Image (tube, rainbow, N blue to C red):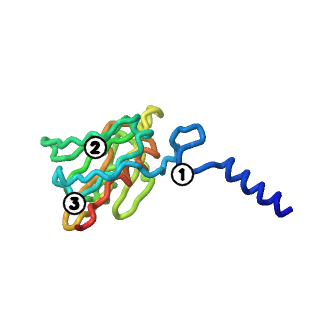
Amino acid sequence: MKHSTTLFAMALLVACGDVTGPAADGNPATDSTAAATLPPIDLAGHGLPLLLTPLDKQFTEGQEPAIVWKDETGTLEVKAGDHFGLVITEEPGDIPRLKATLDRDLLRKNTVLTETPELLTYRSEFPDDATLVFMHFYQVVKAGDRTFVVQDIDGQPFNQQDIERMVVAISPKPPA
């Protein structure tokens, strides 16, 4: 009996494989919470004390993040593929104001999904067209004495998993 239990445990481990690493067929794991294998990108070169944790390329169609400073709006835009796009602006975050704006929206129905003092995720949908559903996030990130707002790129359709990945992609740079 002792040997059959050991054999069963070994067979189970072999059948399951390494759940955190590549799948048995050689393809990367598809867990949406899989940590990026790339080192964080320091955004200090753009004047921001923030770090960007790039996604695993399986989530960005193999694309590296494109980081572009937009002079006309004073924002830093980060895009990688069709499922990752965010904008960083240095400004005091105001989640209550955003919620009030969403409540007054006469064109779209907005539903708050997650709300904390630093994060608001919400769904916007057009009542007349069920195919026009957009997921959004608005995040306040404090780095030292500076405050930044990180949010999804407006007009690009994201799903819930995309939003969850983008929310954890930007973090304050640790003090030296």
Residue drawn at x 32%, y 37% is 155
The earlier-in-sequence mark between 1 and 2 is 1
Residue drawn at x 35%, y 64% is 117
Mark 1 or mark 2, which is nearer to you? 1
Residue drawn at x 46%, y 46% is 161
Let me know if residue 109 appears in the view.
no
The amino acid beneath tag 1 is Thr
The amino acid beneath tag 2 is Val
Which residue, given by chain and number where applicable, does mark 3 sit on?
92
C-alpha span from label 2 to label 3? 20 Å
- Residue 20 has which mark? 1
C-alpha span from label 1 to label 3? 38 Å
Relative to 164, is 116 above or below? below
**Is label 2 in contact with label 3 (beta carbons under 8 Å)?**
no
Q: Position of residue 97 (x, y in %)?
A: 28, 57
Binning the other alpha carbons within 10 Å of mark 3 as few (below 14), some (14 to 19) or many (20 upward) gives few
The earlier-in-sequence mark between 2 and 3 is 2
Could you tell me which quadrant the N terminus lies in? bottom right
**Is label 1 in contact with label 3 (beta carbons under 8 Å)?**
no
The earlier-in-sequence mark between 1 and 3 is 1
